[in-house]
């Protein structure tokens, strides 16, 4: 093993804060794509994660009920790429669990968590009413 490889960190991360405005979601998705491109991930490897990130941000923007910035983080290691969206808003009384199904009504609302789950290899929601919600989205790296 060469010296450069031994000194290289095995985990990379990026943290940003975005205002709870729709245009900020576009910036966060672009940041994820740039982060992935910089670390030589194939576009197809992050396409679904980018879509799920957009859904998580849309939920935070629409439902957090606060003007506080949304924290967005990306972490990459040899096994996976993970995006985390944290708002400091109203929180949820119930968090989704298990395999989520799409709503029977084909309306534009109520599909976010199911979409996020389908676009990721792992998905988690933690929420505290009155304190906010954290959504973790991840994809395993493909060889």
Image (cartoon, rainbow, N blue to C red):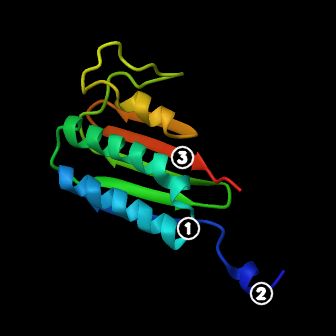
Q: Residue at x 35, y 62 (%)?
A: 30
In the drawing, does residue 29 fall left or right of residue 12? left
**Element at label 2:** helix
In the picture, the quarter occupied by the N terminus is: bottom right
Residue positioned 33% across, 54% down in the render:
71
The numbered mark, 2 or 3, whose residue comes first in the sequence reads 2
Give the spatial CA distance, label 1 vs label 2: 19 Å
Q: Which residue is mark 1?
A: 12
Relative to 40, say whether 99 is above or below: above
Pick the front one: 41 or 121: 41
Q: Nearer the viewer, residue 70 or 117?
A: 117
Q: Residue at x 71, y 56 (%)?
A: 143
Q: Mark 3 and mark 1: span between their CA atoms?
A: 14 Å
Disc 3 or disc 1, which is closer to the eye?
3
> Can you see residue 54?
yes
Give the residue at the far bottom of this rendering: 3
Q: Secondary structure at mark 1?
A: strand
Residue found 41% across the figure and 25% down from its top? 95
Choose the circle earlier in sequence order: 3 or 1. 1
From the image, tell me which residue sits under label 3.
138
- Image coordinates of residue 63 in percent, x first then y, are 22, 34
Between the C-alphas of marks 2 and 3, the distance is: 30 Å
- Residue 20 visible within the image: no
105 up-or-down from 138: above or below: above
Q: Which residue is mark 2?
A: 3
Observer-side mark, 2 or 3, equals 3
Percent position of residue 141, x then y: 64, 54
Q: Secondary structure at mark 3?
A: strand
Residue 112 position, x and y percent, is 35, 32
């Amino acid at each position: 093993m060469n010296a450069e490889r031994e000194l290289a960190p095995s985990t990379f991360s990026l943290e940003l804060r975005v205002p709870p405005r729709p245009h900020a979601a576009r910036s966060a998705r672009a940041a994820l794509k740039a982060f992935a491109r910089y670390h030589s991930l194939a576009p197809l490897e992050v396409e679904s994660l980018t879509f799920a990130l957009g859904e998580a941000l849309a939920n935070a923007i629409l439902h957090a009920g606060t003007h506080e910035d949304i924290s967005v983080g990306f972490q990459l290691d040899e096994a996976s790429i993970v995006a985390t969206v944290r708002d400091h808003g109203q929180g949820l009384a119930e968090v989704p669990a298990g395999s989520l199904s799409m709503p029977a009504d084909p309306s534009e609302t109520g599909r976010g968590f199911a979409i996020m789950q389908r676009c990721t290899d792992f998905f988690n929601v933690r929420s505290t009413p009155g304190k906010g919600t954290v959504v973790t989205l991840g994809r395993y790296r493909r060889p």
